[in-house]
Amino acid sequence: MNKKTVLSGVQPTGDLHLGNYLGAIKNFAKMQNENDCLFCVVDLHAITIFQDPLELRNNTYETTAAYLACGIDPKKSIIFNQSQVPGHAELAWILNCICRVGWLNRMTQFKEKSGKNSENMSSGLFTYPTLMAADILLYKATHVPVGSDQKQHLELTRDIAQKFNNDYKSENFFPLPEPYIEKDISRVMSLRDGNSKMSKSDPSDYSRINLKDDQDTIVKKIKKSKTADTTIPISDDQINKIPEVSNLFNIFVGVTGLTKSELLSKYAGQNFSNFKSDLSDALIEKVCPIGNEVTKLMQDKKYLNQIMYEGAMKAREKSAIVLKDVYDIIGFVKQ
């Protein structure tokens, strides 16, 4: 059976947190054992909103280090920095000429990010989805791990791929990528508000567990995390009615592999002190080694540069084949 070609990326915006790990990076390590995987640091996407150059460069290294610390093996997967592969920007322009303005106008994420200030947002933020389509189609990826906030963009990628195939009478040239669904992907919410995603943009550092948090910090954050005023619910249905409690259970499941049923059998009807203490221990066991490894790797920029360079060369080689065919199909003159 042919392997799936899987592509995904993480923006180098700094302060990677538990949501990034459980919602994406943790599962990348699993995917590489059964699929052909490419994992990029999507710095071209990051600059749709202004980034301080020094911070962007540092965050790019840190995201690469996090990939490695979380178990992504450069011998099994291609790890690279998006801007080091020119084909991403080249194909993005071509796809901008395929994509319809009406399609982009329907993208809800732009509306959410821009709000009432859309006229002052960068055009890059508006055309962000066509760059994402280029990321995927440049390698003819068949599957893409996506969260709920990216499903619409993947659907747009499929529409763009289909229109290209139809316009240029190149049936099945671009595959229509499918979402890669992992059963245990966790949507991690804020520790302070169970209805909001865990995010580095939240002004309160107590809303999230950062991958570089130390033991004492993790204990403090979990101890202060919002819960119900009552004891721990006795059923899954009752847990789901309280977003903050449901979130803590999901985190516990994500870092230990235990089921909710197993957790309920141990903690149902108790107060939250033992539960939070044990959750803190589980997080310390999972998160601290990752943070320590990231810190260690960040001291060896030469090694990180080597990983990014070798990955970029592999990605360039793969992308050049597809881009050459695209140019030929379109009718560009080749030298």
Image: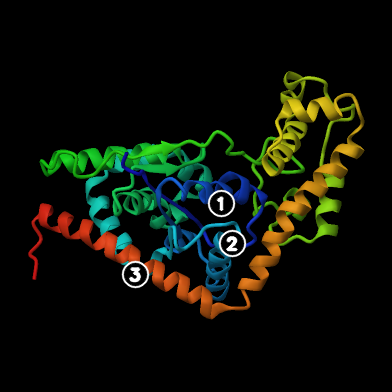
Q: Is residue 297 left or right of residue 181?
A: right
Question: Is 67 situated above or below 231?
Answer: below
Q: Is residue 45 left or right of residue 57?
A: left
Quadrant where the image shows the N terminus: top left
Specify whether residue 65 is in view. yes
Specify which label sits upstream in the sequence, 3 or 2. Answer: 2
Whether residues under marks 1 and 3 lie with C-beta atoms below 8 angstroms apart, the answer is no
Check residue 313 in the rendering and tell me which mark sits there, or answer none.
3
Amino acid type of the residue tagged 1 in the rendering: Ile
Measured as percent of width and height from the top left, residue 239 is found at 76, 25
Q: Which residue is mark 1?
A: 25
Image coloring type = rainbow
Amino acid type of the residue tagged 2 in the rendering: Ala
Q: Which residue is mark 2?
A: 66
Dot 2 falls on a residue whose secondary structure is helix
The residue lying at 34 percent from left, 48 percent from top is 133
The residue lying at 55 percent from left, 47 percent from top is 24
Category of crowding for the residue at label 1, using alpha-carbon neighbours closer than 10 angstroms: few (below 14), some (14–19), many (at least 20): many
Question: Is 79 situated above or below 237?
Answer: below
Specify which label sits upstream in the sequence, 1 or 2. Answer: 1
Furthest residue to the bottom? 302
Measured as percent of width and height from the top left, residue 158 is found at 31, 38
Q: Is residue 177 left or right of residue 235?
A: left
Question: Is 98 situated above or below 239?
Answer: below
Q: Within the image, what quadrant is residue 63 found in?
A: bottom right
Whether residues under marks 1 and 2 lie with C-beta atoms below 8 angstroms apart, the answer is yes
Quadrant where the image shows the C terminus: bottom left
